[in-house]
Amino acid sequence: MKGCTEILIGAQWGDEGKGRVVDALAGKTDVIVRYQGGANAGHTVIVGSEKHVFHLLPSGMLYTGKLCIIGNGVVVDPEQLLLELQELQAQGKDRARLVVSRDAHVVLPYHKVLDGADEAFRGKEHAIGTTKRGIGPCYVDKYNRMGITMGDLVKPDVLREKLSQNVNLKNMLLTRIYGMTPLPFDSIYQEALEWGAKLAPYLGDASLEVHKALEEGKGVLLEGAQGTLLDVDFGTYPYVTSSNPTAAGGCIGSGVGPTRISRVIGVVKAYCTRVGEGPFPTEDLGEWGDYLRDKGGEFGATTGRPRRCGWLDMVALRYAVRINGLGVLALTKLDVLSGLEEIRVALEYSLEGKQYREFTPSASFLENVKPRYVSLPGWKEDISKCRSFEELPQEAQNYVKFIEEHAEVPVGLIGVGPGREETILRNF
Ligand code: IMP
């Protein structure tokens, strides 16, 4: 692990349990980097009876001596970041050193207002179901070369000029297009300056920090947010987020070159969930979907929205293996399936008499396909105390082996409960 970089990504629609897997790995690595997304994410880490939900901070913050980095690819909501930092500080748990890339873009109040206005414009029929955290509009400004970076927050003159240009344009949009009230420049500017003053000690050259760590032979873990099927390039567009949660995004969002990546870890939940709108071929709208939601506590960590639930989709998982070059899987929430008589897994899709084994991210295709399921026998036992693969009931072992066989990737970590200890490691 030393001197090399691993990327950890979500292999489904997000909420796979990446936070708990990063937490399990963080003890063995030195640097943890968030590389894309923003406060739309909610990474939950449970240690003993304590639960921490990180929206922006990397999930390694609870470990002493680690370096945690918010990379250039993240869009930072400073208010949320300060809130998370203050919470950890108040509990004496800000144990890691934090560096925030000066080049990461800032989510400003107008991004959140526009996120809501865009969704309202799309209407019920075309809404994406965003988290309304301003993510899309902030990335729009970044790619339109109008964005404000974290580094700008500590340069009052630069900030004034860039912000006034932005507020002017956004106010034209808000008033003339959306018929809304304009936002006040002065208070946004003052607030942004305050953020800059508070966050200045954390700002730095993030990619250089990572590079130096690698040169010193240290291990680096790039922590993805959301998941493969929400990727703006490879997900179920337009029902996606506005960044690249896939492995390639890890290089762009951190400044680590592809030749330094040693392994890509895909986090996959033992069943599927999705929050927001968009196609979900294996969604179960009946009693099993409700069962998984209740038993798995499937409610958004950021918005509290109930997650849509369904069965494991091997067509989609094989796609995630392909797009991310996955070398190993971390299978989470296997315990949620305990007690089910049968477990369904989709192996292929059918549409108009044709069978499909390859995932195509086209929303119109996925909305119409019918999954072809196989049914595997379930198990009754509580597996949360199992700490080795062999201790799992035979049916649970078979389920894991079935996933490995069809994904053609080994399962190196199995989550059998939400806690840090409730983990089975297999040559991970
Ligand atoms: P946005 O990222 O807020 O623009 O939302 C775009 C889509 O991605 C919506 O369907 C959200 O529900 C979904 N999404 C964004 N972040 C997450 C996440 O962390 N977990 C699961 N879904 C997410």
Image: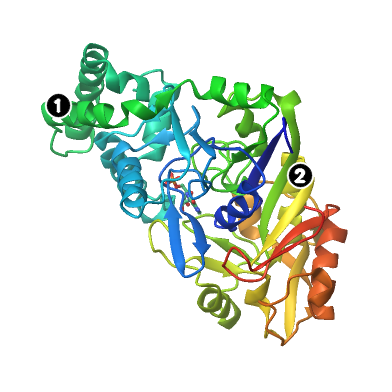
Ligand 1 has an atom within 8 Å of the beta carbon of the residue at disc 1: no
Q: Nearer the viewer, mark 1 or mark 2?
A: 2
Q: Is residue 344 left or right of residue 18?
A: right
Residue at 22 percent across and 38 percent down: it is 178
Mark found first going from the N terminus, 1 or 2: 1
Q: Residue 81 placed where, x, y %?
A: 35, 41
Q: Which is nearer the eye, 296 or 318? A: 296
Q: Please, what is the three-letter code of the amino acid marked with disc 2?
A: Leu
The correct choice, above or below, for 294 with respect to 275 in the image is below
Left or right relative to 118: residue 254 = right
Which quadrant, please, contains the N terminus? top right
Image coordinates for residue 84, horizontal then vertical, percent: 35, 47
Give the numbered dot on residue 326: 2
Dot 1 corresponds to which residue?
185
Q: Please tell me in which quadrant of the rendered image residue 268 appears.
A: bottom right
- 177 relative to 80, above or below: above
Question: Residue 50 vs residue 372: left or right?
Answer: left
Label 1 amino acid? Phe
Q: Position of residue 97 (x, y in %)?
A: 46, 36
Can the viewer see residue 335 in this picture?
A: yes
From this view, report whether residue 358 is shown above or below residue 285: above
Which residue is at the front of the view, 35 or 29? 29
Using the rendered view, name the quadrant where residue 201 is placed.
Answer: top left
**Secondary structure of the residue carrying numbered label 2:** loop
Q: CA distance from mark 1 to mark 2?
A: 46 Å
Side of 339 where 308 appears, left or right: left
Residue 365 vertical position relative to residue 175 in the rendered view, above or below = below
- At x 32%, y 19%, the residue is 152
| Mark 2 residue crowding within 10 angstroms, few (<14) / some (14–19) / many (20+) | many
Res. 157 image quadrant: top left
Q: Coloured how?
A: rainbow
Contact between labelled residues 2 and 1, with CB atoms less than 8 Å apart: no
